[in-house]
Image (cartoon, coloured by chain):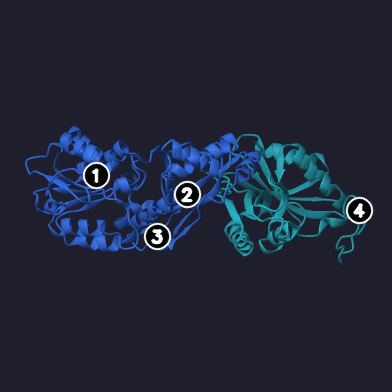
């Protein structure tokens, strides 16, 4: 497949870097201000080098990406809320041109799911978005394989930053502010960690899961969301007295989406440590399935994008 | 790890006036004929292993209970994945407590005794200004509004009583009402501006 990649952050760059390993060709790579486009294949190495040294991937206008002869648009621009722009318009343009779209951007799938599906229905192309939920962990493809109708609930830990903070608080008996500063030093938490610690990032992923289970109907505003900022170290100590710990757990069902700090047994599968993620897929006929792995990171998330590309039919 | 759980019902009499001579209770109507024998229903939860039923019945027989019927609900599962068993027995009221204690001593977890019907124990952690907002009122509301029995409480206020503190409250609740109970505790938390850290449903995790 010929890939046009929008977004040159960790994920977009990793997709470009790994594409050839998975048998695909990159014909365009763009960030918000520049692009490099060549329908016979771009020089990925020099584009990545240009991005890292000068901040621009090339000399072309990002608009020219849509004029390139590509099979799959990889939407890896930053997640935005509400109207989910410009990601949504990127997807729309590609589908209207009868191309496939693979999203790593959570915004359009969480906030405008029905519109995406309507555009897809009118297009020869299709959309896939494994990378939006749980990075390298095959969550959506597992649900697809089990068929969504047979899945009754999905629960789990889908934010590594919040999980890292809770794990360190429990292990070291430290308070939230202290551990957050440490996580920022280690690069686990961003300078502004709000979306991770207030539960928004996890909620977007569970909204996407609820949309998949229900064929739409959910947006972030429909989710009940609590973060971990108000959980003191003493709460973790008390939980430990009972053989339990506290994790930021999300739940998606056909009835709704809920994210918040919950008590889980210390030895349970959901009590993953550090930045690890886990999902529990509760099925009607086959009990619970668990998948755990790296829920974030450039190369990890890029493998989910490239798996999606591999599942697309030829146009 | 307890293999057996017991649920006790007393359909015939409210067995308050039994043991310790503390006759404060509701000793309502139903005068007892002396030496009277009462019928009790005991609900057990058994692990599906050979010998478990016998292990659970022995303490009843050994302590003066007369077994009337045993309803072994094979094929049914309790929320914890155990098999429910209903036992009808008769004994004098003053022996009933002894039977319950013997079951406990045999490693049988009593989650319902007397007139209370409790199917499950859960813990919640509350975080907030627990002391300023009248902790005993909070606990009372949990008992009354959320129909849960507070079994124990562990409070942690490392920075004194004024800043935010945390409490772990262990509750006995009727497993059929778990969602309602938790919803009520959430709304008490919302009233008093607490964070309520709840357990996950199912316990399978």
Residue furthest to the bottom in view is B29
- x%, y% of residue A78? 30, 51
The residue indicated by pointer 4 is B35
If you read the primary sequence from the N terminus, does the residue marked by circle 2 or circle 3 appear first? 2
Q: Residue under mark 2: which chain is it in? A: A
Q: Are marks 2 and 3 on the same chain?
A: yes
The residue indicated by pointer 3 is A220
Q: Secondary structure at mark 4?
A: loop
Q: Residue under mark 4: which chain is it in? A: B
Q: Chain drawn blue, letter?
A: A
The residue indicated by pointer 2 is A197
Q: CA distance from mark 2 to mark 3?
A: 16 Å
If you read the primary sequence from the N terminus, does the residue marked by circle 3 or circle 1 appear first? 1
Q: Colour of chain B?
A: cyan
Give the quadrant of the N terminus of chain A. Answer: top left
Q: Secondary structure at mark 3?
A: helix
Left/right placement of residue A301 relative to residue A122 reads right
At a point 46% along the width and 52% down the height, the residue shown is A199
Q: Secondary structure at mark 2?
A: helix
Q: CA distance from mark 3 to mark 4?
A: 66 Å
């Amino acid at each position: 497949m010929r890939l046009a990649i929008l977004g040159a952050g960790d994920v977009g760059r990793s997709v470009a870097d790994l594409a050839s390993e998975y048998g695909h060709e990159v014909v365009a790579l763009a960030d918000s201000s520049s692009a490099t486009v060549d329908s016979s294949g771009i020089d990925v190495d020099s584009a990545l080098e240009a991005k890292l040294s000068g901040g621009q991937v090339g000399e072309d206008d990002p608009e020219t990406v849509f004029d390139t002869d590509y099979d799959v648009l990889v939407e890896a621009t930053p997640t935005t809320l509400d109207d989910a722009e410009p990601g949504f318009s990127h997807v729309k343009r590609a589908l209207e041109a009868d191309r496939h779209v693979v999203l790593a951007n959570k915004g359009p799938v969480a906030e405008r799911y029905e519109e995406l599906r309507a555009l897809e229905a009118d297009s020869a192309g299709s959309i896939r978005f494994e990378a939006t939920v749980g990075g390298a962990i095959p969550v959506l493809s597992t649900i697809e394989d089990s068929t969504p109708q047979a899945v009754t609930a999905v629960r789990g830990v889908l934010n590594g930053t919040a999980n890292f903070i809770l794990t360190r608080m429990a292990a070291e008996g430290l308070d939230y502010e202290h551990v957050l500063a440490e996580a920022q030093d280690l690069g686990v938490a961003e300078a502004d960690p709000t979306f991770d610690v207030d539960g928004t990032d996890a909620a977007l992923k569970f909204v996407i899961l609820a949309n998949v289970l229900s064929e739409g109907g959910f947006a972030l505003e429909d989710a009940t969301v609590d973060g971990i900022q108000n959980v003191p170290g003493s709460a973790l100590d008390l939980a430990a007295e009972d053989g339990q710990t506290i994790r930021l757990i999300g739940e998606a069902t056909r009835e709704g989406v809920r994210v918040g700090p919950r008590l889980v047994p210390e030895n349970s599968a959901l009590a993953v440590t550090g930045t690890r993620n886990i999902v529990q897929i509760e099925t009607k006929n086959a009990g619970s399935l668990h998948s755990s792995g790296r829920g974030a990171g450039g190369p990890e998330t890029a493998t989910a994008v490239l798996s999606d590309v591999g599942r697309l039919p030829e146009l | 790890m307890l293999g057996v759980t017991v649920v006790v019902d007393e359909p015939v009499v409210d067995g308050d006036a039994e043991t310790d001579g503390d006759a404060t209770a509701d000793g309502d109507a139903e005068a007892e004929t002396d030496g009277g024998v009462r019928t009790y229903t005991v609900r057990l939860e058994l692990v599906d292993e050979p010998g478990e039923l016998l292990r659970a019945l022995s303490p009843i027989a050994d302590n003066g209970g007369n077994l009337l019927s045993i309803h072994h609900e094979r094929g049914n599962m309790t929320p914890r994945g155990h098999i429910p068993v209903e036992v009808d027995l008769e004994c004098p009221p003053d022996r009933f407590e002894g039977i319950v204690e013997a079951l406990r001593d045999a490693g049988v977890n009593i989650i319902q005794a007397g007139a209370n019907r409790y199917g499950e124990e859960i813990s919640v952690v509350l975080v907030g200004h627990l002391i300023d907002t009248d902790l005993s009122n909070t606990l009372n509301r949990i008992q009354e509004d959320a129909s849960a029995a507070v079994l124990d409480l562990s409070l942690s206020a490392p920075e004194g009583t004024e800043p935010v503190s945390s409490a772990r409250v262990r509750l006995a609740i009727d497993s059929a009402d778990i969602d309602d109970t938790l919803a009520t505790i959430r709304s008490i938390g919302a009233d008093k501006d607490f964070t309520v850290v709840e357990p996950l449903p199912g316990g399978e995790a």
